[in-house]
Amino acid sequence: MKIESLKSVPAGYTDTPLEPMPRLAAALGLDAAHCGLYIKRDDMTGLALGGNKARKLNYIIQYALENGYTALMTFGGVQTNHGRLTAAAAVRYGLKPILVLKGQKPDYLSGNLLLDRLMGTDLYFVDTSAADRLPAAEQAAAKQQYLDKCAAQIIADYEARGDKVLSVPVGGQTVIGSAGYVQAVPEIMAQMKAQGIRAKYLVVGYGSTGTFAGLWAGAKYYHAPFEVIGIPIEPDFRPIEETAAFINELSSYFELGFTCGKEELHLEFGFGAAGSSPSGSASFAGSDSAGCGSCGGSAPSGSCGYGGIGYNEPDAVTESYIELLARTEAIFVDPCYTGKVLHGYIDLLKRGIIRAEDGAIFMHTGGAPGLWTKEHLDHMQDGYWSDEGKDRAHVFRL
């Protein structure tokens, strides 16, 4: 099947803005008038406060409707952005939204969970913490086995009531879903042409990898002028061999006409970067990374600087980059994904891995509701709400 003939529905908006970031450039000591720093605003896809998964869901929902599904089920962490958007797309097209969430049910409702509940989503929490008592080598398999068992039971329960459930993998990483980001590339190229933008690099998060894989395949297929660079958003990231294999599956399914070797994929990790933060007037003389990786294999476990200390774990470094973009461009990134990618984007500029004069696009994939999850709100109290003078919160008392 040719990808150009693949049908989709408008689950969310595409043609999202491609904008310059002159004030961020100025804060980094660059010429703001000729900064070469750009941001692709896929946080503005419109669906349930926006985010990159809307592009994938345009195709996934089309597939569900064509094949008679009545319910849409997917997986993720307790505060999954993909889950929020999948639930929203299901609601918009009259399907039952079901989320299977890996972790314990929180005592306090916040962030994406509140939005999920407002949409009437059926939530299932799968607590696999008992597997932590097993030998380390056995834990992942035991957790996955239990999750699969629970998912099968959930599907059976709905089907017994007459529903037909489409199970969507974590992050919407399917061949059909990733078509959304293959097809995002000609959109970006058209915007670059219309605005007279030159860009040699596009920096994006590397998580479940469907977005990264789609963009890489699209850049290859459409002969984009930019290289796609992935920033792992957690220390324990998906093996690069799996991503190369998935890209080859995309190419075969949509007759894209190429093969991808793992050595062609460019990931940057920022080894040793955790624990450093940008200053308000950072210069390009220094770097906040002790080392880097341009990966042909994989990084050592736990050493992924840009990925922070763990998946969705609060850390002050990521928060400092969130603050920097908010104070310069009034754009919000989140602590789980895009704040970490922004960290990598800026550090790669500082280290000369990418050059502002060549043009560099930061792909904003959304996730802002993560700022209002209880764990991140709690972590930010000391930094932003503990000192009246430092916090710029002035109180007049009679």
Image: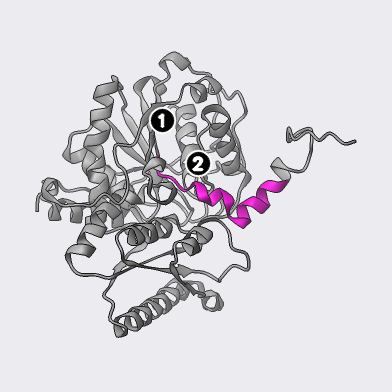
Q: Which mark is residue 333?
A: 2
When asked about the image quadrant of residue 156, the answer is bottom left
Image coloring type: one colour
User: Relative to 64, is 208 on the left or the right?
Assistant: right
> Residue 289 appears at what percent x and percent y?
53, 37
Image quadrant where one finds the C terminus: top right
Name the residue nearer the viewer: 26 or 95. Answer: 95
Q: Secondary structure at mark 2?
A: loop
When asked about the image quadrant of residue 159, the answer is bottom left
Q: Is residue 164 magenta?
A: no
Vertical arrangement, residue 173 with respect to residue 363, above or below: below
> Residue 73 appears at what percent x and percent y?
35, 68
Residue drawn 44% across the image and 55% down it: 81
Q: Which mark is residue 3?
A: none
One can see residue 243 in this view? yes
> Residue 75 appears at what percent x and percent y?
40, 66
User: Relative to 116, is 56 on the left or the right?
Assistant: left
